[in-house]
Amino acid sequence: MSTLPHLLLERPVWRPAFGLACADDARGRRVTEGLRVQVAALAGTAQRPALEAVAGPAGVHALHRAPAPGAGAAIVRITDRQGRYLPTRLRCTLPLPAAGLNTAACIGGDVPLFLHPAQPAPTGLATVRAAIWNTRTGAPAAFALLQLFDADTGRPLGRGLADERGQVLAPVSPAEPVDTDGAASPPLPQPAAQRRWRLRVEIRHDPGLPRHADPGFGPAAAPWPDLCELLAQPLQPAFAGLGSPPLPLTLATLRQGEPLILAADAGGLVVVHPA
């Protein structure tokens, strides 16, 4: 029996009300599993109860129903069930853009996730660790942003975000190493044990950084800074240890096969003096 001829008049297309993707900040790769993404729409200054976005196979977390009628804004909280990444909080606009995904205005793409400092070194990347202390407040420099650059070319090599204890892990991906005499490109052939890279160290820190409680996520949600506010923290002079006079910390040397701990020879503390 033959199939009767038919004409396709229309095809329904489902379009989510919200979509967001996250990427490992060190590798630039989209994180496709293990994340919890919650969205709380804003009605004026009040937050509606948060809804949980569902992850798709491509790592896009989507809502099957609108978190609020009409256009507006929403607060998004991202946590990692596997403990690999620090939590992230950002503000985005609703509804879903005509092209692309929801994201924070300061990013314009996938949301970067920063490795938790308790994580081991990522495979294939070098690591820089630090304990950052704020001498003005007499407390850890919570949520300080550690940025590392090639000292010769200025190329960004990696960054990391401190947790509330001021501990930070910054994976780096260095290019060709400098030679043992300190000359830049092109490097001379050298044994792997002698390879090293000069890093320029920058720290951004604001001790008054707001921490948002976000009642739409329930009483269990810990106050956390906003991602855009974290990235916009001012640069601060950094020093090695608590000695007197203070030793400026602007450069560091990364050696092949060795994790770098900043200020290891000066008590293990990187000190900032924010204005």
Image (cartoon, grey):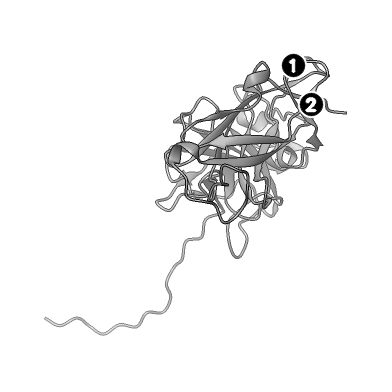
Residue sitting nearer the eye, 73 or 30: 30
Q: Does dot 2 land on a helix, a strand or a loop?
A: loop
Please name the residue that numbered disc 2 is placed on.
207
Residue 140 drawn at (x, y percent):
71, 19
Q: Is residue 115 above or below residue 63?
A: above
Amino acid type of the residue tagged 2 in the rendering: Pro
Q: Quadrant of residue 161?
A: top right
Foreground residue among 43 and 140: 140
Quarter of the picture containing the C terminus is: top right
Q: Position of residue 17 (x, y in %)?
A: 56, 54
- Mark 2 nearby-residue class (10 Å; few <14, some 14–19, many ≥20): some
Q: Residue at x 44, y 41 (%)?
A: 192
Q: Is residue 85 left or right of residue 264?
A: left
- Quadrant of the frame with the N terminus: bottom left
**Residue placed farthest to the front in the image?**
181
| Label number found at residue 164 | none
Residue appearing at x 42%, y 41% in the figure: 33
Which of the 4 image quarters holds residue 268? Answer: top right
Is 270 rendered above or below residue 32? Answer: above
Q: Residue furthest bottom?
A: 5
Question: How far from the left and from the top, in percent, is residue 13?
Answer: 46, 66
> At label 1, which amino acid type do we have?
Ala
**Residue 40: in sight, yes or no?**
no
Q: Are marks 1 and 2 in contact (CB under 8 Å)?
A: yes
Looking at the image, is mark 1 or mark 2 earlier in the sequence? Answer: 1
Q: Residue furthest right?
A: 275
Res 139 label: 1
Q: Could you tell me which secondary element the residue under label 1 belongs to? A: strand
Residue 189 visible, this orientation: yes
Rendering quarter of residue 98: bottom right
Nearer to me, 167 or 212: 167
Near mark 1 (Cα within 10 A), the count class, few <14, some 14-19 or many ≥20, is some
